[in-house]
């Protein structure tokens, strides 16, 4: 399972199921969230699998209990992968208006993911033309209007 996170930027999403997709600004992550911590942490580039600008790729080794110590020894800030923190959740539906109330979920990164890709500042995609289909048999969660 691969997770994704960002500190700020823009995304393509809809405010509600059935709404048209639009480009939305993603405000800076809330203080003490995983996205905030990853934005502010400076990891020695020999530890990170990928380190360009402020982007990070973290691969959790569930067999290697020592990975947290390696990261902590080589960083200016201490990161506790075993800690539960808020993580921003952006999907097909996103509403920046409710950023502080509805867009975060309590997460333990190393328990939830095998890898986590953090892109410090995202840029909304340019969607391809998409046709819609009226089909009563499509599952209820199918992202209509997108």
Image (cartoon, rainbow, N blue to C red):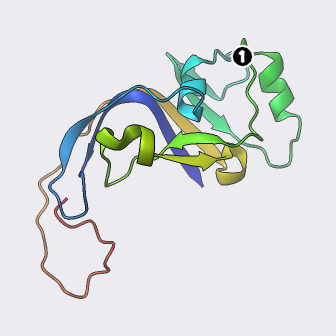
User: At x 43% / y 38%, what residue is drawn?
Assistant: 100
User: At x 83% / y 25%, what residue is drawn?
Assistant: 70
59 sits to left or right of 61: left
- Please indicate, yes or no, whether residue 106 appears anywhere in the rendered image: yes
**Residue at the extreme front of the image, as rendered:** 101
In the image, residue 131 sits, relative to residue 29, either above or below, namely: below
User: At x 70% / y 15%, what residue is drawn?
Assistant: 44
90 sits to left or right of 88: left
Horizontal and vertical percent position of residue 102: 42, 48
127 sits to left or right of 64: left
Asked where in the image residue 84 lies, by quadrant, the reply is top right
30 sits to left or right of 142: right
Q: Quadrant of the N terminus?
A: bottom right
Q: Quadrant of the C terminus?
A: bottom left
In the image, residue 137 sits, relative to residue 106, either above or below, namely: below
User: At x 54% / y 37%, what residue is drawn?
Assistant: 117
What element does badge 1 sit on? Answer: loop
Horizontal and vertical percent position of residue 86: 58, 41
**Residue at the extreme top of the image, as rendered:** 76
In the image, residue 75 sits, relative to residue 104, either above or below, namely: above
Horizontal and vertical percent position of residue 136: 19, 87
In the image, residue 31 sits, relative to residue 145, either above or below, namely: above
**Residue at the extreme bottom of the image, as rendered:** 137
Q: Which residue is mark 1?
A: 77
The crowd level at tag 1 (other Cα within 10 Å; few <14, some 14-19, many 20+) is some
- Please indicate, yes or no, whether residue 126 appears anywhere in the rendered image: no
Horizontal and vertical percent position of residue 39: 54, 22
Q: How many marks?
A: 1
Asked where in the image residue 138 lies, by quadrant, the reply is bottom left
């Amino acid at each position: 399972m691969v997770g994704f996170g960002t500190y700020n930027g823009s995304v393509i999403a809809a405010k509600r199921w059935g709404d048209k997709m639009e480009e939305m600004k993603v405000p800076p992550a809330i203080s003490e969230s995983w996205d905030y911590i990853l934005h502010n942490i400076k990891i020695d580039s020999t530890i990170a699998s990928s380190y360009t600008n402020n982007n990070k790729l973290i691969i959790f080794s569930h067999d290697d209990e020592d990975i947290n110590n390696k990261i902590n020894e080589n960083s200016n800030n201490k990161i506790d992968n075993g800690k539960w923190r808020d993580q921003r959740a952006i999907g097909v539906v996103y509403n920046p208006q409710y950023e502080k109330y509805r867009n975060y979920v309590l997460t333990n990164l190393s328990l939830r993911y095998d890898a986590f890709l953090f892109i410090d500042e995202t840029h909304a995609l340019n969607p391809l033309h998409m046709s819609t289909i009226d089909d009563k048999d499509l599952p209820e969660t199918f992202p209509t209007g997108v």
